[in-house]
Image (tube, rainbow, N blue to C red):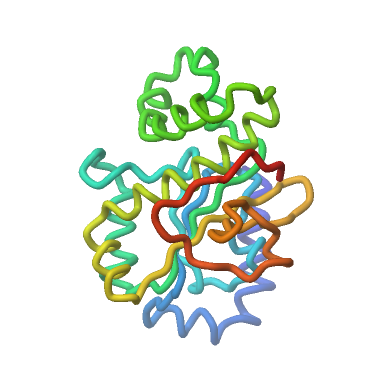
């Protein structure tokens, strides 16, 4: 906690003053163009990874970057998505998974979630991911299986996003695009799903492309 207090003091005395014009502008309202959905994992910092300023990303975070299908849960995810699309008129939604995801490890190994009933219930919204992986990748070992689970989960959650009326309407009008990313913690690389190749490829090598339905990996691919 002391480190946080020191950080606030540094922000107020050294940072805020030099950025006063930006924060004054933000006080008049927000106009982000991107909804960034990612995991709660403390190792992921969307603004750091994308080098964006306050006000440029509308961020939704939870364990496993999960989007419950419309009507399946009464949490904040649905409200946040609806406000971003219908209220803020977001133009792009990025759903970003990451390597070494603890939620996806729990999905593959539910026995590790003993004593965490709420987490177990939450991961039920990724049941489609678990079944896809179980059917397609029976021969993969531990780390490779986790890697492909992280990728498949991004695609499954993008499909769940399409069940939201506000999202469906914006997609139909052409005012919204969906993107699937995976962030590699150990290298800082970002991989985007490429519909033509059916793989997550480095963003530095392949221009990002919207993800159409249905989107599936063509085969296991290491990130």
Residue 135 point in image, percent of width and height: 49, 26
Q: Nearer the viewer, residue 23 or 117?
A: 117
User: What residue do we see at 64% from left, 36% from top?
Assistant: 147
Q: Quadrant of residue 167?
A: bottom left
Q: Quadrant of the N terminus?
A: top right
Q: Position of residue 40 (x, y in %)?
A: 52, 44
Question: Which residue is at 62% across, 45% downward?
Answer: 98
Name the residue at the right extreme: 187
Q: Quadrant of residue 203?
A: bottom right
Q: How many numbered circles are shown?
A: 0
Residue situated in front as seen by the camera: 106 or 79: 106
Q: Is residue 112 above or below residue 42?
A: above
Left or right, 60 with respect to 11, comes to left
Residue 212 against residue 13 in the figure, above or below: above
State the quadrant of the C terminus: top right
x and y percentages locating residue 119 in the rendered image: 42, 26
Q: Position of residue 168 (x, y in %)?
A: 27, 62
């Amino acid at each position: 906690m002391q480190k946080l207090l020191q950080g606030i003091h540094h922000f107020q005395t050294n940072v805020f003053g030099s950025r006063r014009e930006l924060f004054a502008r933000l006080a008049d309202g927000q106009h982000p163009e991107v909804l960034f959905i990612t995991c709660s994992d403390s190792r992921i910092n969307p603004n750091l990874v994308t080098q964006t300023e306050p006000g440029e990303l509308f961020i939704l975070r939870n364990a496993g970057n999960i989007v419950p299908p419309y009507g399946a849960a009464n949490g904040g995810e649905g409200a946040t998505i609806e406000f971003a699309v219908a209220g803020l008129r977001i133009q792009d939604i990025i759903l970003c998974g990451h390597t070494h995801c603890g939620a996806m490890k729990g999905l593959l190994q539910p026995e590790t979630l003993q004593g965490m009933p709420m987490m177990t219930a939450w991961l039920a919204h990724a049941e489609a991911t678990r079944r896809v992986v179980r059917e397609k990748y029976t021969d993969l070992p531990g780390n490779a299986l986790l890697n492909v689970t992280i990728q498949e989960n991004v695609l499954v959650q993008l499909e769940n996003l399409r069940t939201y009326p506000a999202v469906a309407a914006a997609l139909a009008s052409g005012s919204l695009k969906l993107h699937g990313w995976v962030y590699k913690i150990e290298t800082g690389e970002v991989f985007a799903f490429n519909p033509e190749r059916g793989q997550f490829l480095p963003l530095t090598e392949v221009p990002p492309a919207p993800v159409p339905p249905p989107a599936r990996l063509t085969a296991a691919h290491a990130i």
